[in-house]
Amino acid sequence: MRRLAWLDALRGLAAVTVVLFHLSPQVIGTGPHLAVLRHIDLGKYAVLLFFLVSGYVIPMSLERHGSLRRFWIGRLCRVYPAYLATIALFAVLATAGLLHWPASLRAETGAGLLAHVTMMPDLVGVRGVVRVFWTLSYEMVFYLIVAGLFAWRGHRHSAWYAGGLGLLAVLAGPHLPDALLVSSRQDRRVLAAVLVLVVVLTVALQIRGLVAGAIGVAFVLLPALNGHPGAGSTVTSSQQGLLLLAVMFAGTVVYRWQHGQTGRAAGLTALTVVTAGLIDTQKIWTVLAVMATFLSAYVLRTRAMPRALTWLGQVSYSLYLLHVPVLFLMPRLVPEIGTATLPIRVAAGLTYVILVLALAGLSYRMVEQPGQALGRHLLRAIDTHPPRHRQTTTERAASGTRRGENSRESV
């Protein structure tokens, strides 16, 4: 049994929840969909669950790799192939007249292109090619911050970061600027260009010292001061952006707690602060459902997980990225689906689910796995030809963090 199958199961559950949430208005109707939404937001439930899992996995991945160079090679080869393939698929469908580019991208093509290079369209203020790209903005910021903390040798103090971000969001969130860095289209284009330059330099330089680490940590200011830079953003405020980062660090707290790297009191305090902040800004049942799901999976982590869920977890990234373009095609395949009889809508929904699962499986096999294989090849090349400079600060920091992190998870 894979030691971390419970994380795959959580990914799988989150991915299929997002798919069904976006599908439900067309199958059960807008009225019933909104009735459920008034009590629990299953879309936010899935996103928060994804972020908790990322918070748990990313520090583990960084420490398993043992250096920032190895981490970034593995991570970029993990996330960019399927991301670029999704954009390419959308472009083909748009060229064929089956889909339409988002209006904000048509109006601000330069800013949109640059923002997609760094995976940060939401924090620039333009709509992603696919709407769900907004979560990748926060994933990338989290990678940069955690890598910066690793360079500073401060990566084990997750409880402070989770609690601090949660407390800042609760106390100062309503007073934070939501668009400090942009006020016009020109500003968005400049911000997108600057982010490309800074991200590239940070990733390239983090392997060599503390300065780039400081830049990585400073990325926390982007969602803190520019969480809602435009109408194209999905996140509605800097307060919400900070809470999303706090959720990811809460996942890291669980990882540190499990491995005896943080005190129970500090960990519990941090998790309480983050939970309180989420409840203050989200539907209470949504937050409680996320916590109950993650806690249940954690308690059962040593037991065998359902194979269906672990498979869904393996293909969850492709499933998450690809399900929206396919969903946009449904009205073309089933005209007037909203007024069709219930059996027809259910049949169309089942067909859609089968199709998108097959497409996700194909993407995982043909795009994600080759990308991961490329990452492993590059890492072997690094091991065969080590750099000729003295051990860096980050490499020294890694020497004490590689205790048994040899799990086989795809991270």
Image (tube, helix red, strand yellow):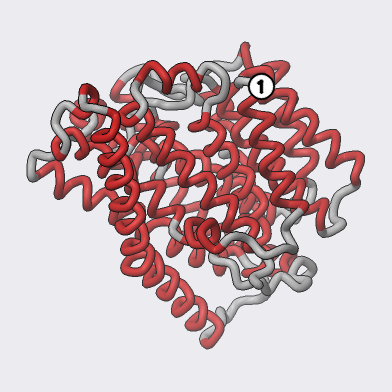
89 relative to 371, above or below:
above
Quadrant in the picture for residue 239: top right
Crowding around mark 1 (Cα neighbors within 10 Å: few <14, some 14 to 19, many 20+) is some
260 relative to 111, above or below:
below
Quadrant of the frame with the N terminus: bottom right
Residue 51, can we see it?
Answer: yes
Quadrant in the picture for residue 359: bottom left
Give the residue type at disc 1.
Answer: Ile
Residue 188, can we see it?
Answer: no
Residue nearer the viewer, 115 or 337: 337
Q: Residue furthest top?
A: 175
Q: Residue furthest left?
A: 96
Residue nearer the viewer, 291 or 175: 291
Q: Residue at x 29, y 45 (%)?
A: 352
Judging by the rendered image, the residue that carries numbered circle 1 is 284
Quadrant in the picture for residue 62: bottom right
Q: Residue furthest bottom?
A: 384
Residue nearer the viewer, 341 or 64: 341
Q: Residue at x 35, y 26 (%)?
A: 25
Q: Position of residue 319 (x, y in %)?
A: 39, 51
**Apparent side of residue 246 relative to residue 127 in the rendered image (left or right):** right
Q: Residue at x 24, y 27 (%)?
A: 341
SS state under label 1: helix
Quadrant of the frame with the C terminus: bottom right
Q: Residue at x 70, y 23 (%)?
A: 277
Residue nearer the viewer, 246 or 190: 246
Q: Position of residue 144 (x, y in %)?
A: 56, 48
Q: Position of residue 374 (x, y in %)?
A: 40, 74
Q: Position of residue 10 (x, y in %)?
A: 59, 50
